[in-house]
Amino acid sequence: MNPTPVHSRRRWRVLLVLCLAALAFSVPLALDLANRGLAWHAFWSLTGEERPLAQLRGMVELFGNATRLPPDTRPDVPVNGASVSPFGVNTFLEQEVEPEKREQIVRMIADAGFDWIRQQFVWEDIEIHGRGDFTDRRNDPNGVDAWAKYDQIVDLADQYGLSVLGRLDNPPAWAQTTPGNFAPPADVQDFVNFAAATAERYKGRITTWQVWNEPNIYPEWGEQAVNPEAYTELLCRTYDALKAVDPNITVLSGALSPTVALTGRDLSDLIFLQRMYDAGAGACFDALAVQGYGFFSGPTDHRLRPFTLNFSRPQYLRDAMVANGDAAKSVWITEAAWNPIDSPEVPDDVSGRENYGVVTPEQAAAYMPLAYQRAQEEWPWLGVMTYWFFKRPADYERDQSWYYFRMVEPDFTPLPIYDSLKAYLTGLEPTLYRGVHQAEDWAVTLNEAAALEPVDGAQFDEAVRASNAAFTAQGRSVSVRWQGDSPLVVMVDGQPAAEYAPGEASWTETTIASSLLSGQHTVTLTSASPFLLDQITVADFTLDDAIRLMNPAALALAAVGLAVLALIQWRAWRWRRR
């Protein structure tokens, strides 16, 4: 039966209304995205994408987060090793021939506001010719002290107030039988002895050591398949040796490289870590080291998929730590950056052009400060994040894509990334964001005589004894865990807030500020007699929380959208049938 003219017109009106409604939504959205309006900024803050089509795709993928359980990162538990300043940079100071250039590098790093350098102590450059031989005879038959330039590097770090994260790897040829420049030694004890000798030489001056680098990818384990169990043996034996030198040393695991590969020579960082735990590695490191490259999207990318590489990936490794009982340990990102290879200066035939992602120099300069800011606001379990890298001694590696991560040219000309990070770090107001922060946190200002001391019942067996503590916090509530003989006097935003008497128990939990909405407050704590301050807890509602709440609504909205599309198609099919 043919449809009557009235029915036909009615169907056309319905279709027309639906089309007009779609246009009324899509046209303003397209104009907003094209002109970087409110929607563009909202999509950017969720997907890390700048191009409109990529943002739309990213939003669809973000809704896919709701189909998977989010990583369990436990942002509200105390974490050891996360109280240090997070700002660091990788250096190759040992490759600079002139001592003056080493000093210029360290001075520029300190001037930019960094607090850490990650410096390699190259085994093959120190114990060069044989076991226990620390004399360098490569260019002088009479030999020179192989430690000398490393001594100067440590002296320079002390002089300019920088902490050193020492990276231990790169075996000498005499210690290896497996092919490959980075293959582990034939006898693990040779590496253990080198690590212990290095830690002993710089005892009390370097208290943070990293055991190997990227053991889950080629070529960092030599010309052989990677082996989580063999690496765990090396890690555990080295951990014991370093702790024997100084129990206060912080031992970092070898940084896991982000990869989804399941080949013999490369193995997913997530699988590699779990196999490490299965082999007993949980007892053999104080902080987990990972690499945190952003690849093709910006630092605001909140998409989470196990097979996607973006800046959010460390959350999955944190999830594995929580699952294996290591929630109290911190994560350190020992290499973080975006590769500014989308630039006219880069040769077209550069090797591995897209291996590390592709951004412009302007994007790289803008992204890294945002990465540091996001980490502070959302990841209270993170310790140090070191930029990859400061400079190379010369430009002979211009044909390699990784060369373009540099912050300054070999002639010390600063690049945009150096200027942007210097502006960010030197203008930053230290702030405590959501999380449980130790009293010695880098963002807490203590009186000069304040000191960390062993205390029974403290979260990590130590607390700060102080007469004054001040900090800025961003959140909905702020509480402190303290004990003392006199009342605790609290000032908030320069105004007297309250005076709290000591509790009957040895430790007192006191909420000193609270509001329905998140806000920033400057807090000062004083007492007539020195008091013990253990930790400061900041509660807040973060963007990740919003995304978790948004996901069910997003799924419902998507279901409604699919139902509307199905209805349109069904009506159109019915109309054609008639």
Image (cartoon, rainbow, N blue to C red):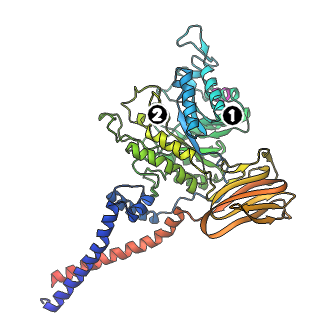
Numbered circle sitting on residue 242: 1
Q: Quarter of the image containing the C terminus?
A: bottom left
Numbered circle sitting on residue 322: none
- Given the current orientation, which residue lies at the most extreme front position? 494
Q: Quarter of the image containing the N terminus?
A: bottom left
Query: Which residue is at a point 56% across and 8% down the rendered structure image?
Result: 141
Q: Earlier in the sequence, mark 1 or mark 2?
A: 1
Query: Which residue is at a point 54% across and 44% down the rendered structure image?
Result: 290
Graded by Cα atoms within 10 Å as few (under 14), some (14 to 19) or many (20 or more), the crowding at tag 2 reads: many
Secondary structure of the residue carrying tag 1 is: helix
Q: Is residue 240 above or below residue 270?
A: above
Q: Tell me which corner region of the image, top left, top right, bottom left or bottom right, holds residue 38.
A: bottom left
Q: Main secondary structure of the magenta part?
A: helix
Query: Which residue is at a point 38% across and 32% down the rendered structure image?
Result: 400
User: Residue 425 in the image: x percent, y percent?
Assistant: 56, 45
- Number of marks present in the image shown: 2
Q: Which residues are magenta?
A: 193-197
User: Residue 216 in the image: x percent, y percent?
Assistant: 50, 40
User: Residue 239 in the image: x percent, y percent?
Assistant: 66, 37
Graded by Cα atoms within 10 Å as few (under 14), some (14 to 19) or many (20 or more), the crowding at tag 1 reads: many
**Which of 64/104 is in front?**
104
Residue 264 visible (yes or no) = no
Amino acid residing under circle 2: Val
Secondary structure of the residue carrying tag 2 is: loop
Gap between marks 1 and 2 measured at Cα = 34 Å
**Which of 481/238 is in front?**
481
| Residue 195, magenta (yes or no) | yes
Amino acid residing under circle 1: Leu
Q: Tell me which corner region of the image, top left, top right, bottom left or bottom right, holds residue 21.
A: bottom left
Numbered circle sitting on residue 408: 2
